[in-house]
Image (cartoon, rainbow, N blue to C red):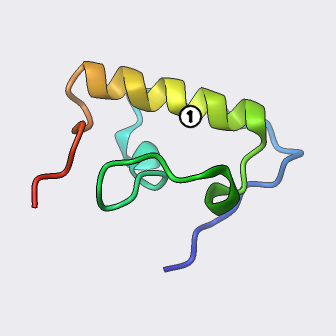
Amino acid sequence: MAIQRFKKDNLVSFDYKDVKTLQRFIDIYGQIKSISKTGLSAKQQRQLATAVKRARHLALLPFVIQG
């Protein structure tokens, strides 16, 4: 499955309420994908991590995927 990479020139902001977008950056075990797989800059990766953690806290995303 190919991941669409964001260009580093584009301004990308992550919203914790946009669950569909956040799910693209989470693997099947519920972990945030690494910066090498997402193609984001370090700043964007930190924003992504913050948004995912907020969504998990509000139960919009699971902490762990039950298998």
Q: Is residue 10 above or below residue 25?
A: above
- Judged from this view, the residue extending furthest toward the left is 67
How many labels were placed on the picture? 1
Binning the other alpha carbons within 10 Å of mark 1 as few (below 14), some (14 to 19) or many (20 upward) gives many
* Above or below, 48 relative to 28: above
- Image point (69%, 62%), residue name: 5
Residue at 24% in and 19% down: 58
Q: Secondary structure at mark 1?
A: helix
State the image quarter where residue 18 is shown. Answer: top left
Quarter of the image holding residue 6? bottom right
Whether residue 15 appears in this view of the structure is no
Farthest residue to the bottom: give it: 1
In the picture, which quadrant includes the C terminus? bottom left
Residue underneath mark 1? 48
Q: Is residue 51 above or below residue 37?
A: above
Residue 49: x percent and y percent? 52, 31
Q: Residue at x 11, y 53 (%)?
A: 66
Residue 47 place in picture, x, y as percent: 62, 27
Q: Residue at x 27, y 19 (%)?
A: 57
Q: Residue 7 is drawn in which quadrant? A: bottom right
In the displayed structure image, the side of residue 4 where residue 25 appears, left or right: left
Q: Amino acid at mark 1?
A: Leu
- Residue 8 at x, y = what percent? 85, 48
Closest to the observer: 53 or 17?
A: 53
